[in-house]
Image (cartoon, rainbow, N blue to C red):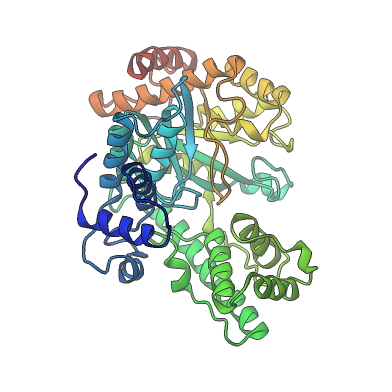
Amino acid sequence: MQEDTSIIRELIRRRYAGAGGELTPAVIRRLRIELLEEMLGDPLPGELPYQKFAAVERLWGEDISRLQALKLLHDEAEAGNIRPAPSRGGINTHVHTSASFSVFRSPGEAAWQAFMNGVMVFGINDHYTIAGHKEFAEACNLLGIKALFSIEALALDEAAQAVGRRFNDPNNPGRIYLSGKGVVKDLKPGSREEALLSGMRQSLERRNRLMVEKVSSILSEADPNIHLDFDDVLLLTPAGNATERHIAQAVETAIEGRFGSESETAAFLSSLADVPEADIPTAGARRQNFIRDRLLKSGRPAFVPESPDAFISLDDMVLLFRGYGAIPAYPVLGNPNTEGESDLRALFEEMKSRGIFAVEVIPNRNDRERLEQIVRAAAAAAMPVFNGTEHNTRDTQPLLDKFALDPEFKGIFARGAAVLLAHQHLSRERGVGYLDANGRPSVDGDPAKTMAHFEEVGRGLII
């Protein structure tokens, strides 16, 4: 067993003090592993939650970084004290981390869970930010995982909105989620692309602040001892990239902090939402979703509509993602079947005409028949297909869903991962990515030739 620092020894001592039983080497090892896994969620100096965290947890003035904890966990696995699932070629190119909102408390924790679940190629895909990319890269490299780097944001097609045409946001005509797959550089300071991203983020923050004001007023009216401000929400984020889900989490925290028991908390929520107490979910992801649905969503008392400057056009989003050196990709909703996705072949040709030359899916949202339709249409359009699970809630779910290792789809997803790995590699090493300077497929402007070439290069990188 490795020589531990004083922080680990002290934490083991504190935990054991209330546990009872004999402190055997096996117990010490188990406690040590548990503590190291917990440390994967510890905030770091410079992150917004750190000051509050340090005041409670770091009384002896010593820190272990998330990556240091990850290294010690990997050493335990190498020593046979932790047994990850065997890798069977699992691929997941789309998860969110704490840099936006996720069940993962850090990019390093996401990588550790991928390692433990036998994921071979793994991709970060946060909303409106690449802040988690550096830690994600270091964590995946430490664990021997092939890392992919992407970003996601929401665009608006005003013509589609005007006629009520929906795409992959089924509740909002004209809104289109888009991913930039294979980020290889940051945006140029002072560039139009940087201004586009900054404008969206500023608008979203203004909306979130207004929602917090409204929900705080609702809470204080119900109980004058409950108060919420935007700083409470920011403390749930590492770098201030707050979302509607963070507001719901902050509301849950404020209410639970007011009352001394679960029954009192449930009774308050029952009165606030005007539902039977038996319908109040238990604390955690389900309760946060309940709060969001009852207070923050459209038609609810704390809802604030997005302002027009929260969205940029689809063409501008493509430009933004190309500023990152990324491949613009259309995430297919699949189910429900919206107007924009009713004819997939026509949709994919339309996307290609707009500079979008790849498709991604969250397979577990679809049944086999619909997923087959998606991959067939993508093959006809010569568009690679990237798969993922999102993990954009506090819910725990598998990193490899029911289709990830399915023989019918595994090869398709492996092809998409190979394309992305090759894009990242060739962009950095040779300055030639999947798309050329004009945003067209880089091999003779031909999507099929480009996909075949990048797949061939990427296959060699996966091994």
- In this view, the residue in front, 300 or 142, is 142
From this view, report whether residue 83 is shown above or below residue 185. Answer: above
Instruction: Identify which residue is drawn at 73% across, 22% down.
Output: 369
Instruction: Identify which residue is drawn at 37% across, 57% down.
Output: 16
Q: Position of residue 277 (x, y in %)?
A: 77, 68
Position of 307 with respect to 334 (left or right) is left
Position of 271 with respect to 134 (left or right) is right
Q: Quadrant of residue 167?
A: top right
From this view, report whether residue 92 is shown above or below residue 262. Answer: above
- In this view, the residue in front, 166 or 216, is 216
- In this view, the residue in front, 323 or 79, is 79
Position of 1 with respect to 333 (left or right) is left
Image quarter where the C terminus lies is top left
Q: Position of residue 332 (x, y in %)?
A: 62, 33
Q: Residue furthest bottom?
A: 224
Q: Is residue 368 visible?
A: yes
